[in-house]
Amino acid sequence: MKILFYLHMHQPWRLARFRYLDLGSGRPYIDRERNLAIFRGIAERCYRPALDRLIEATSNFPDFRFSLSVTGTFVEQAEAAAPDVLDRLARLVKTGQVALVGETYYHSLAFLLPAPELAEEVDRHAAMLKERFGAEARVLRMTELAYSDDLARFAESRKYSAMLAEGWDGLLHGRSPNHVYCAASAPTVRLLLRNYPLSDDVGFRFSSREWPEYPLLSEKYVSWLGQSPGDVAGLFMDFETFGEHHKAETGILDFLAALPGAVDRDRRLSWGTVEDALALPPVAPLAAPVTMSWADANRDLGAWLGNDLQRSAFEAAKKLGTLVRTLGDPVLLEEWRRMLTSDHFYYMYVGGHGADLGVHQYFSSYGTPYDAYANYMNALTDLRQRTVSALGRRDPEKRSPPVASAPEQ
C-alpha cells in the first residue's frame, strides 16, 4: 500500500478591527503587523521545526515521498515574516520527493462565485507555484477539500489529472477510501481520497489523554496502516498539526520524525505523492451531485454558509464582486479577493456542539460570531462605498442602490 501523506499550509490575512465609525476613514482592512506577528510565532513553533524534520527525512530515506499545498496568502506572509520558511519549502521541492498541489490562491470560496473568479484564482496560484518553486501541479484541491461533480468538470477543463476529496461515507456508499477512483462527471479526473479515521488519529486525537489509544507512537500507527486493506491510504491534514495544533511537548514532532523510518521498516507499505498515485487505475467512478468538504461532522458547506450571518455576508461579498469587476481597479480587486478567504466566514459559525464548535472557537480570535460578522460587514461596506464612488467618478450616470451596513456589535 502507498501512503499518500499530504499536508496543507495556509494562513489567512485576518481583518483589522473595523468599526461602523471607521467607514470612510481610509483605515486598512488588514491588520498587517498582527498577522505577521502570528505568522512568526507559528513559524517558530511549527513551520521551522516540522520542515527541518521533513528535510532530514528526505535525506535519510530516499523512498520517503509526500505532498504539500501552499496558499498564496501563506506565501505572502512568509515572504514578509519568515522568508527562511520559503527557503525550506524550496529545498524540499528540489529533492524531487515532494509534489505540490494546486488550489485557489486565497483559500477562498471562489468555487461558489460566477466565472471567471475560480479559474483566475486557480491560475494565479499555478503561476505562483511556477515562479516561487519552479513546480507545476497536476492535482487540484479546493478549499477544505470541497468537491462536487461540477468541480471535477472544472478540474478537467483546467487540465488537472486528479482532485483531492474527503473519503466520506456519503460519497463512497460502503466502498473503501483506500483506492483510486475517478469522477463520474469527468472520467479523466482521478479522485484521491482522505482516509479520515487514520488522518484524524493524528490531526485531532494525537494529544488527547482521554483517547483510548493515547499515546500514539509511530510503530503503533504504522501497524494500523499495514493492517488497512487497499492500494493507497490518504493521510491528509493541516501542516499546523505538527507543533501548533499539537504542541511540541505532546511528542508530535518526534512522531513526525520517526514516521518515515517506521514505514520504511514495514514491507507492506511504501510512500507516494499524490502524483505517484495517478499511475494506479481507478477502481470505479464516484458521483457527488452536492458539494461536500472535509469540514465538520456533516461534511458539507455549513462551516462557512450554515447560518444567516454567514449567508448574508457571503451574498454581500458576491454582489460586491460584480461592482469590483465592472470597475476593474486592481487594488480594489485585491481587497475584495482577500475578503473571499474562507476563514472570515468560518469565524461566523453559530450553533453546533462538541468537536465542531470547539474547532471553530479555536481558530477564531473574535469574542463571538456576531463580532466577526459585524467587523466583516463594516469592512465590506467600506469597500463597497469606495467601489461605488470610483464607479461614479468614472461614469457619473452609473449608480448603484445603497446597502445597509452592519451595526457595530
Image (tube, rainbow, N blue to C red):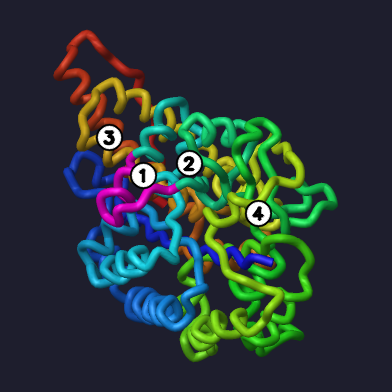
For residue 373, say whether it is visible: no
Residue furthest to the top in view is: 397
Most foreground residue, 57 or 409: 57
For marks 3 and 4, give the CA distance: 34 Å
The quadrant holding residue 152 is top right
Say which quarter of the image contains residue 203. bottom right
- Residue found at x 71% / y 60%: 231
Using the numbered discs, state the Cα–Cα distance from disc 2 to disc 3 in whole angstroms: 15 Å
Q: Is residue 132 magenta?
A: yes
For marks 1 and 3, the one nearer the N-term is 1
Residues packed near mark 2 inside 10 Å, few (<14), some (14 to 19) or many (20 plus)? many
Which label is found at residue 193?
4
Callout 1 amino acid:
Ala
- The residue mark sitting in front, 1 or 2, is 1
Q: Mark 1 points at which residue?
A: 126
Image spot of residue 76 (x, y percent): 26, 56
- Part of the protein shown in magenta: 124-137
**Three-letter amino acid code of the residue under disc 2:** Leu
Marks 1 and 3, Cα distance to the nearest angstrom? 19 Å
Task: Report if the CB atoms under discs 2 and 4 are less than 8 Å apart.
Answer: no
Residue type beneath disc 3: Leu
Q: Which residue is drawn at 73% across and 39% down?
A: 285
* Residue type indicated by callout 4: Leu
Q: Any mark on residue 333, and which?
A: 3
Q: Residue at x 49, y 91 (%)?
A: 249
Mark 1 falls on what kind of element? helix
Residue where numbered disc 2 is placed: 109
Q: Badge 3, how many Cα within 10 Å: few under 14, some, many 20+?
A: some
Q: How many marks?
A: 4
Residue occupying image coordinates x 37% and y 29%: 321
Q: In this view, does 88 lie to the left or right of 159?
A: left
